[in-house]
Amino acid sequence: MNKVKCLFVVFLFLTNFCFGQNNIKPYPTNWWVGMKWNKVQIMLHGDAVGNATSFAINYPGVQLKKINKVENKNYVFLDIVIAATARPGIVKITPAGLTSNDPINFELKARRTGKFAQGVTSSDFIYLLMPDRFSNGDPSNDRIPGMKDQSLNRNEIFDRHGGDLQGVINHLDYLKDLGVTALWMTPVLENDMPNRTEHGYAFTDHYTIEPRLGGAVMYKKLSDELHNRGMKLIQDAVYNHVGLFHFTIQDMPMKDWVHQWPAPTQPNYKDQTLFDPYVAQADKKQMLNGWFTDQMPDLNQDNPYVANFLIQHAIWCVEEFGVDGWRIDTYIYLNLDFMNRCNKALTDEYPHITMFGEAWVTGTANEAYFAQNNINTPFKSNLIGVTDFQCLYSGIQPAIKQPADGVNTLYETLSNDFLYKNPMNNVIFLDNHDMTRFFSEVGEDVARHKMGIAWLLTERGIPQMYYGTEIIMKGIKNPDGWVRLDFPGGWDGDPKNAFTKQGMNNDELAVQQYVRTFANFRKNSTAIKTGKLMQYVPYNGVYVYFRYDNQQTVMCVMNTNDGPATIDLSRFKERMNGFTKALDVATGTVFTLDPTLTLGGRYVLVMELRK
């Protein structure tokens, strides 16, 4: 398909997407009784469904309020109200005036029970993985007949490799033992695209879980298995765009379902246009409405039907699959008023659920703008937290890569936390699926890699680790497939197995144990999980910070120099008074505190202070 045809999807607007007789589908596919969101807009999609002369619902407690016919006759949007008295069952939506007037079944379910929608907080440790690249637990779903992408080749970085949700389930105990409390996976919704389906960000049906990952049954099983272990499920949400082969793109309900352009137009990637008091509206429009690629049409959240479709889908996923937290992709490219509505709809329904948005920007003020903040601006975001790129790019990366001077930028970046309403809600990280792996970023230096891990698991905020960081997987983003390689041991016959330690070298084993030690210490540390942060101005490449509360004090000394450093502990008496001993978290040894402390180069000493 050539680029022009891909981009100018208006030609698809009134195409006839054939369903066949009696094949009208409702979206959402079901709803629940007893929901606060009880005014539901049902999208009906089917061949010429818009030609119906009327629709009728005869079900106790369910009222059809309005029939919305749109430009494409293959769609009708029904507004219904579900009363508090409604009971679970099958609501029959009966059309009139069609070739077949058979009822369309719409199920009302009882609410989900048990723990879910718990929220993800600073007490958690998130593990990010790509299901296709983590473990293949069910080879029978590696290829699904009829799907467009039939690739299956582990030697090709852009082909599918066969990882699935059963593979993740098989190794949840490994993650729990590692200290992980929350699992974030790249998207699990159907991506029936011709290629590049391994990442999951080009949805083709919001109400179908990717069958090559195991489908809805396996996603529910994964949710249950996580909750049974006291762990949490984070879903990756994409509101900005869909895949070109999404059914609402191949057969669009209306012309403005997506943002249309007279010529191929990508965003200008300038987040400043959203808060610049001097912005040209044309620049702001391009930032918000441009298409990422010609394969990912940009959804128009100003369209009320699109907005309802996306908000209802978010609620549906939480209730259907027991989601605990919500990671929101490409947040800075979204209509922010819409996002405030969507976030509020989720927290209204699930008061404890949390959301964090991808805010890949430069500058703390820029980043804070997209979250709950203390900035006096006309627009105020209600987003609970962001992915904290500032702590990465202006924080830990220069601290470790630029000895002596770089650590000052880490101190300065954290000093700007006054901009956030609650910086503890930000997700901090060393790398992810879109960037060079941290081990490669620090020149494959194990000592510096361990410094990053010690910082990640003691800093304020919610730590997130990308799969393989715990075993020093490497990869430079050129292109991104090289940072998305398979986790060793996830496939039968792998010569190296990080789950069983077979074939691992000493460095890999040491770092894996290092992560396990610090993550499990963190799991039981009130000071790190919910305590305060106090930092001291760095001197001579040494940065000292404390995590503390009324029960515990943890002291972290980061020596970014290649050689050893000695510090005078009297400088830190504000936080150290009354303590005479310290537990070295990495080694488990207890030692007496002397007036001075010497530690080796490229090292973070983490101590629990004791009396």
Image (cartoon, rainbow, N blue to C red):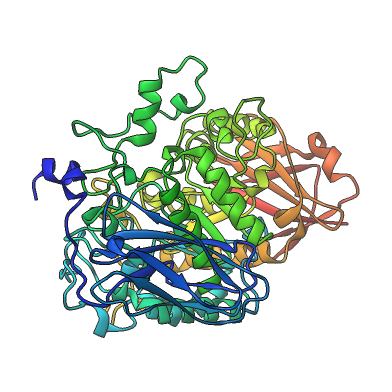
**Quadrant in which the C terminus is drawn:** bottom right
Judge from the rendering whether residue 117 lies leftward or rightward of residue 272; answer left or right.
right
Residue at figure coordinates x 49%, y 40% from the top left: 389
Q: Residue furthest left?
A: 2
| Residue 228 image point, x, y percent | 60, 82
Could you say which is closer to the camera, residue 418 or residue 495? 418
Judge from the rendering whether residue 368 lies leftward or rightward of residue 213; answer left or right.
right
Judge from the rendering whether residue 471 lies leftward or rightward of residue 112; answer left or right.
left
Could you say which is closer to the camera, residue 57 or residue 467? 57
Name the quadrant containing residue 332.
top left
* Label tally: 0
Q: Does residue 373 lie above or below 378 as drawn? A: below
Q: Does residue 578 lie above or below 74 as drawn? A: above
Residue at figure coordinates x 54%, y 42% from the top left: 388
Q: Residue furthest right?
A: 578
Task: Note whether residue 489 is visible.
Answer: no
| Residue 563 image point, x, y percent | 54, 40
| Residue 316 image point, x, y percent | 50, 66
| Residue 8 image point, x, y percent | 18, 41
Name the quadrant containing residue 589.
bottom right
Task: Note whether residue 280 is visible.
Answer: yes
Q: Does residue 179 lie above or below 12 as drawn? A: below
Could you say which is closer to the camera, residue 572 or residue 389? 389
Could you say which is closer to the camera, residue 221 or residue 489? 221
